[in-house]
């Protein structure tokens, strides 16, 4: 197999393609041929733009200037949710933890 590298598109390019898709003047297949990207990428970029606005294409997929407190709160929620899922799975699989008194 040859070495394939992943294409990295600029946020301006993604924005331009997503706007073209939102306008609806051309089919996705036409846009894909014109911009030389897959239709799935165009659909994803269009959806992201409509949901999150232009800031969605900031580098490394980070949302524009997030509040550290909001990020921390979101992480705590995620960890709590995952803990509940793990406990549920352990119960369903019958895994006991002797160091915790064998729940």
Image (tube, grey):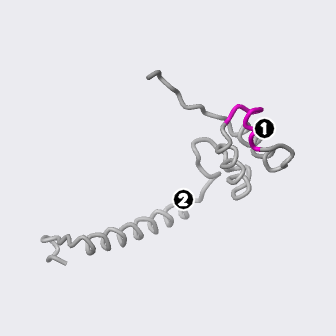
Which of 77/16 is in front?
A: 16
> What residue appears at the point 13 percent right and 70 percent down from the top-left corner?
99
Q: Position of residue 45 (x, y in %)?
A: 68, 47
Q: Locate residue 101 relative to residue 13 in the image: left or right.
A: left
Residue 68 picture quarter: bottom right
On whether residue 22 falls in the magenta region, the answer is no
Instruction: Label 1, secondary structure: give it.
Output: helix
| Above or below 53: residue 25 | above
Q: Residue 57, position in %: x, y?
A: 67, 45
Q: Is residue 32 magenta?
A: yes
Under tag 2, what secondary structure?
helix
Q: Earlier in the sequence, mark 2 or mark 1?
A: 1
* Labels in figure, total: 2
* Dominant secondary structure, magenta: helix
User: Which mark identifies residue 30?
Assistant: 1
- State the image coordinates of residue 83 (x, y, percent, origin top left): 35, 69
Question: In this picture, which residue range is highlighted in magenta?
Answer: 28-37
Indicate the position of residue 101 as horizontal and vertical percent values: 14, 77
Q: CA distance from mark 2 to mark 1?
A: 42 Å
Above or below, comparing residue 102 to residue 32 in the picture: below
Name the quarter where the N terminus is drawn.
top left
Please give the name of the residue rendered at 30% of the width and 70% of the height, measured from the top-left corner.
89
Residue under numbered circle 2: 68
Q: Residues within 10 Å of mark 1 (few under 14, many from 20)?
A: few
Mark 2 residue crowding within 10 angstroms, few (<14) / some (14–19) / many (20+): few
């Amino acid at each position: 197999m040859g070495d394939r590298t992943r294409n990295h598109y600029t946020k301006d390019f993604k924005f331009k393609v997503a706007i073209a898709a939102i306008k609806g003047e051309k089919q996705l297949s036409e846009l894909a041929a014109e911009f030389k990207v897959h239709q799935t990428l165009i659909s994803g970029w269009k959806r992201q733009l409509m949901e999150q606005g232009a800031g969605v294409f900031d580098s490394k997929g980070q949302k524009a200037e997030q509040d550290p407190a909001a990020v921390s709160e979101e992480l705590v929620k995620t960890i709590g949710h995952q803990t509940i899922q793990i406990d549920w799975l352990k119960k369903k699989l019958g895994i006991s933890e002797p160091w915790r008194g064998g729940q």
